């Protein structure tokens, strides 16, 4: 539900670019809203690097002390073969329902992703978040943009350090390496159940994919693909504080 504040903001900026983007009333990421004291998840207005307004979805409460801007979400089984979610990389411009965020078939423009990314320090992937009352960090993936910039990197099986991962209860924390694929005309960014030689992998036979592509197979045990209505999400975000604490190497407890 959009508040009067956001409706008025959209009305003020929808007709022309914004000449000045530093005002706290003209946020470029969901983190800007959190810094202004907003804590309710929902639809918010952002401006891109050119000063144009658009609607997005912000998660401001599921991970205390952090804010996340939704850039892609799809109903995994139903839409996994569409190029937006299978073969079009994060490095490519392949929007669908851009500016109209929803859980079932949505991908932002590359220009807006770049704008949000420029205000972010992290990316994350979630499963079925539209059905969760709170994030329990199961079937969840988070990384630092400085370790893997998902808007620029392309390549085959490559080990990267991640910030946190949990797949069906198997978890690992900051600095652990896991494999990713993002290959032009083949695979959108994802990981799978192959034993890659990286420090973390989730074993499954036959091979299934996690957090994207899903061309090798769907796991009936993984939240993103466990039921026909299951969804997959990707986000950019950041933290109010640079200091985040972990109970141990495999269980985040807050920010």
Image: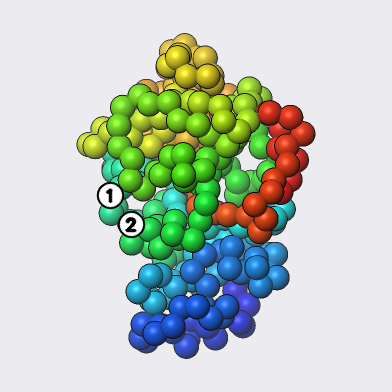
CA neighbours of label 1 inside 10 A, class few (<14), some (14 to 19), many (20+): some
SS at mark 2 in the image: helix
| Residue at left offset 51%, top offset 56% | 120
| Outermost top residue | 205
In this view of the protein, can residue 132 be seen by the observer? yes
| Residue at left offset 50%, top offset 26% | 177
State whether residue 136 is above or below residue 156. below
Q: Of marks 1 and 2, which one's residue comes earlier in the chain?
A: 1
Q: Which residue is mark 2?
A: 110
Residue 127 at x, y percent in the picture: 56, 40
User: For the image shown, how many numbered marks are present on the structure?
Assistant: 2
| Outermost left residue | 185
State whether residue 38 is above or below residue 201. below
Residue 199 or residue 211, whichever sits in front? 199
| Residue at left offset 40%, top offset 57% | 113
Q: Does residue 62 appear left or right of residue 218 in this picture?
A: right
Q: Does residue 73 appear left or right of residue 33 in this picture?
A: left
SS at mark 1 in the image: loop
In this view of the protein, can residue 231 be seen by the observer? no
Q: Which residue is mark 1?
A: 92
């Amino acid at each position: 539900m959009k508040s009067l504040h956001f409706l008025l903001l959209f009305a003020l900026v929808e007709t022309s670019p914004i000449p000045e983007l530093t005002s706290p009333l003209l946020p470029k990421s969901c983190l800007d809203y959190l810094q202004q004291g907003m804590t309710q998840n929902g639809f918010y207005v952002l401006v891109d690097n050119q000063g144009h307004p658009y609607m997005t979805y912000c998660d401001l409460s599921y991970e205390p002390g952090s804010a996340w801007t939704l850039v892609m979400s799809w109903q995994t089984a139903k839409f996994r073969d569409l190029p937006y979610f299978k073969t079009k990389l994060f490095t490519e411009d392949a929007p669908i329902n851009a500016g109209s965020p929803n859980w079932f078939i949505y991908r932002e423009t590359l220009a807006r992703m770049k704008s949000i990314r420029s205000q972010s320090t992290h990316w994350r992937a979630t499963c079925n978040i539209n059905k969760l009352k709170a994030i329990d960090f199961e079937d969840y993936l988070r990384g630092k943009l400085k370790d893997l910039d998902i808007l620029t990197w392309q390549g085959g099986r490559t080990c990267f350090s991640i910030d946190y991962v949990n797949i069906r209860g198997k978890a690992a924390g900051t600095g652990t390496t896991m494999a990713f694929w993002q290959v032009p005309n083949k695979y959108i960014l994802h990981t799978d159940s192959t034993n890659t030689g990286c420090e973390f992998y989730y074993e499954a036979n036959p091979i299934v994919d996690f957090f994207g592509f899903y061309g090798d197979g769907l796991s009936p045990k993984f939240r993103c693909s466990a039921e026909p209505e299951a969804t997959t999400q990707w986000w950019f975000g950041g933290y109010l504080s640079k200091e985040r604490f972990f109970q141990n190497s495999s269980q985040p407890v807050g920010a």
